[in-house]
Amino acid sequence: MIIVMKPHASEKSIQAVAKYIEENGLQVHLSQGEEVTIIGLVGDKSKLSTETLTIFKDVDRIVPITESYKLANRKFHSEPTTVKVGSTSIGPGNLTIMAGPCAVETNDQLMCIAKAVKTAGATILRGGAYKPRTSPYSFQGLEEEGLKYMQEAGIATGLATICEVVSSDAIEAAVKYVDMIQIGARNMQNFILLKEAGQSGLPVLLKRGLCATIDEWLNAAEYIIAEGNPNVVLCERGIRTFETATRNTLDLSAVPVLRQKTHLPIIVDPSHSTGSYKYVPPMAKAAVACDADGLMIEVHNDPAHALSDGPQSLNFQKFADLTDELAPFCSLIGRTFKS
Amino acid sequence: MIIVMKPHASEKSIQAVAKYIEENGLQVHLSQGEEVTIIGLVGDKSKLSTETLTIFKDVDRIVPITESYKLANRKFHSEPTTVKVGSTSIGPGNLTIMAGPCAVETNDQLMCIAKAVKTAGATILRGGAYKPRTSPYSFQGLEEEGLKYMQEAGIATGLATICEVVSSDAIEAAVKYVDMIQIGARNMQNFILLKEAGQSGLPVLLKRGLCATIDEWLNAAEYIIAEGNPNVVLCERGIRTFETATRNTLDLSAVPVLRQKTHLPIIVDPSHSTGSYKYVPPMAKAAVACDADGLMIEVHNDPAHALSDGPQSLNFQKFADLTDELAPFCSLIGRTFKS
Amino acid sequence: MIIVMKPHASEKSIQAVAKYIEENGLQVHLSQGEEVTIIGLVGDKSKLSTETLTIFKDVDRIVPITESYKLANRKFHSEPTTVKVGSTSIGPGNLTIMAGPCAVETNDQLMCIAKAVKTAGATILRGGAYKPRTSPYSFQGLEEEGLKYMQEAGIATGLATICEVVSSDAIEAAVKYVDMIQIGARNMQNFILLKEAGQSGLPVLLKRGLCATIDEWLNAAEYIIAEGNPNVVLCERGIRTFETATRNTLDLSAVPVLRQKTHLPIIVDPSHSTGSYKYVPPMAKAAVACDADGLMIEVHNDPAHALSDGPQSLNFQKFADLTDELAPFCSLIGRTFKS
Amino acid sequence: MIIVMKPHASEKSIQAVAKYIEENGLQVHLSQGEEVTIIGLVGDKSKLSTETLTIFKDVDRIVPITESYKLANRKFHSEPTTVKVGSTSIGPGNLTIMAGPCAVETNDQLMCIAKAVKTAGATILRGGAYKPRTSPYSFQGLEEEGLKYMQEAGIATGLATICEVVSSDAIEAAVKYVDMIQIGARNMQNFILLKEAGQSGLPVLLKRGLCATIDEWLNAAEYIIAEGNPNVVLCERGIRTFETATRNTLDLSAVPVLRQKTHLPIIVDPSHSTGSYKYVPPMAKAAVACDADGLMIEVHNDPAHALSDGPQSLNFQKFADLTDELAPFCSLIGRTFKS
């Protein structure tokens, strides 16, 4: 951390800052430029509330130098992480497709979708049993009943399973039935839930918040890992911008940026980010091309009658066509898929 | 809701949409323009998943006409709501100031701050006992112990008290000790927490999410009210934009917009939104001038040594000066304050 | 256009709106729902300033139904457009790469870069002679001298050439020396410049403004085409969001959205959008994978000594490696490149 | 400027950076922390393209320490600037109201509006003769004819006059007829126009770009001042965010931020930012309360028949009521208005 003083900061102001730092057990490193004086801190910054330094006289601003996340940081863990989920795994060398309905509706529906996505190449079945909806009057999910259907569909097809959780009750139930849990965008900074997810022992898919910076996202991952659970997978699902032609703006450049900053695997969700099935195939290909480790795609047997998010769901034929088209992209980028 | 068909939509496409609507128990209202055909829906739209209509052939887009929130909507509840909190109330005719430290640190500290803010005109003591922090390594709050200090400070000074809650455990504890609970920005769409807040029986201050639209915010309020708890107060605390000179961008025009859309009282937080004590007084005055019902302001006995958010906290003198300056603005705008 | 009235709008209010519309030569189409009345307009809306309708009593809001751009609109021109630039062309079936330095520096430098990018597969040479820079103290370009170098490099290599223009003087000069002009992001709504570009007779590359919606962008294209110049190519170059890990956020989903909305070709610029050479290759591949018609990439002989935008420039080796890697992606997507 | 090296940067990498800096005539200031090495630059940074330093091996990032604008910077010019416009002036101690129609329509209309706004307390008449419009099919203004009407209305009422300019032709014309020129939001980074405005000799109102940061805005002001024209006034008119309930989001906290960063006067435009006349009075009061030096407000004799932006215009009565309400706010804040 660096403290930039204002031009013409008095010697007295500079000494006051230095004294405060030293009183907190850190060392000071002064650098007197022509225009400004800069004060560096050396030592364990967790000992002082560094932001309060901005209150001191003649302090212009504080510039953080190191990231606050450590366990998720590639600087301290250079090898990419592979996360095991049931009988499959997410990470370098293969492309993982998670597919299924936005919301679990009935046992038959889910079984039928599971078989279709398995045939087309998916290895993880997704399905929402707890639905966080903007309006209290929208369909909120089948809850534990839905989780049971997920388990049955997983056993019948050999697919691993993933469900979103929205509370500690949901996590408790999920542990009994599914292979991976998902923290949704709206809960990315629900820190209680992150800690509980960390304690669950299950691998966690952490979706990016709608207006979360990449650094905040990695700090949220840090909450999970800090509970002793290293099995975190990140999922880019679009950020909120001024553009309204798509539901959100898919930030694909987050993929290579994350590769620099973290060792965790990265999944892209082209369904929720764009909000329209028409945009799913091109964005899925783009995600593979920029080296995402996998995709999360909504698939529905009958999108016109889906209880949630029908417009962005692919039907079976469109999904099968897409995975056929994706396969040669995977070869080009050096990832195993459907083979 | 209106369905706009593409130019040259075929009669068959139009009939398919109309049939789907009628099968779901609604009536269709066709409007054939020169360029486009528009299909209106008449009846109870909750019966169909209207968004799936976008999948139908030749549908260009869906235009919602009515808001999904009803109980929070001024169209169906034209009188402004006054919310009672302990011995004070928030609503038309008076200006409510909630003040106190970002985080409760010790009993003595809180008592000393409580007395100072009471003297300066605050009627509600704020103080965080559960702190949602971006990094897992930052101070996370005193939890229930902090709530007890809040209660003691409230009793000693006659101030009503408010604390943020982040989990159902925190709500259970808060019910025992404080007069009002707060849902923070990061939990604005933690729907489980919203429902539990609704069931708590306590008045709820609902902060706007960092990237929540006003409509999403009112839908979040609807979650609370739909549980039978009409005592919801909204708090604008800045939204996330590209500008980095302030921590967030305080959206003061949300105040008059909310006046049109809802009957709920509106509080403005100039501390968290700007992130700097220097900007708190001008933005506090601006909030009063555009007719906010109150302010939430961070005050600390010793900002340079605060455990959280020191840079945006006012010390006692600055807070007392500010309330002195605010008083004549309240008179101008027709609100009682310190009298 | 549709006018949505407030619930319980009086008959008198409805009649006032209807009368205003009819006085302006349009027809009214009333639709009385259970909750709200909707008024449709039939006829030539250019006859009235429709937005003023929001002032009428009991009007809730105005909903536009048709886009204001016509010539750029795919609804009225379903075939994709191919734009000829010198001896090459941009459009369906092939991938066009525009490459070169951010700023033209010297004749030798440009010639050397031109040869390298030609060898690697580029067909258009880019190079800035007029540089719009945030600070007045940054290097502003060689102006007409730089255009001459562009022409010479184009003749020597057989590459077509493109330069940004920032004024009518620059357009006048550009017409003499280069094959295509570029309107930069900061001038996307410099309507005078758009008109002059339309009158220039040269094909125009129109970059998206940093905070322009897709509809505003297409309206800007409309300005150019309305002057009788149909040769407009769109260039996505990142939009401004809250994320700071990349210079801007590359909105790749704009590519498939534009395919639906317009017949104009679409180029993606992974250099300016990300701001770092490290992110150029993955985003270039992603752009090809989601079916962009081409790429604009910054290439420099010695990025460490570039006068502008060095950090995002590829050196010759990295650029050649990238085009080698891109070729099989083009085959997959059905575009000719380097063959 | 500071260069932050990656953890474990090699001595060789550090020396390479240091050598590059010294070769460019600057001095290096090394600071070796426990985790990272930081390299400070001392000397005239304009000598090197500092951003290219990010290409060097083991460089993590570059942190700018000083702002690139100097003439607009309060650090080097601590006294607030007062700008004279015709017979009035903008700056500390008084509140300036610029009022008038969005677009000049006819001589009679303008004269009638001028008299009304003068009576109500405005001292500068605004009116658009050159209108930058999103669609080429919208009304584009009366051009020079409109400027003449402005001059006549100014002479008749004693009001100073201001008009937006969009090209060098418009500036040339404006110099003959009006007292102040305006650079609109869409042209804030039209650097050619900024330079020409600087050379015009007229005071310049510089509106903030829709997605311009405060630092970019001040750099744009620097372009004008660097041409020898110190008479620049800044105008906050809303930024683009995800919120759609208002046309843009009025960033009122920009007012106190600008007070810290610059000595230039600050005007707030509540009409364009909100897009609705209903929100103009509360936001005008808020702007005065947070110490803006003035307001720009749209006023129209007959908003329902305005050729542009009717919905946000106040009629005469509403404008007179507003200035009456504003007067006591001015007294409170220590500014002269209507006296």
Image: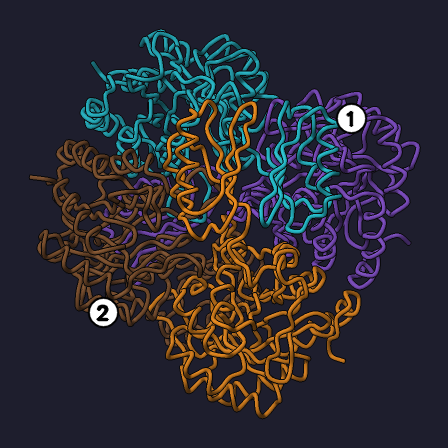
Chain colours: A cyan, B purple, C brown, D orange
Residue A161 placement (x, y as % from top left): 40, 14
Q: Residue at x 46, y 87 (%)?
A: D176
As measured in the structure, the alpha-carbon distance from the residue carrying label 2 to the one carrying label 1 is 74 Å
Using the image as rendered, state which of residue B14 and residue A315 is in the foreground: A315
Asked where in the image residue B193 lies, by quadrant, the reply is top right
Residue A191 placement (x, y as % from top left): 60, 24
Disc 1 is placed on an element classified as helix
Whether label 2 touches label 1, CB < 8 Å: no
Rate crowding at label 2 as few (under 14), some (14 to 19) or many (20 or more) other CA atoms within 10 Å: some
Residue D92 placement (x, y as % from top left): 70, 69
Subunit that carries the residue with mark 2? C
Q: Residue at x 21, y 53 (%)?
A: C263
Q: Amino acid at mark 1?
A: Val
- Classify residue D266 as left or right of residue D303: right
Q: Amino acid at mark 2?
A: Ala
Task: Reply above or below: A154 against C112.
Answer: above
Rate crowding at label 1 as few (under 14), some (14 to 19) or many (20 or more) other CA atoms within 10 Å: some
For discs 2 and 1, the disc positioned in front in the rendered view: 2
Whether residue B74 is visible to the viewer of this picture, yes or no, is no
* Badge number at residue C173: 2
Residue A331 placement (x, y as % from top left): 20, 22
Reading the image, the residue beneath label 1 is: B175
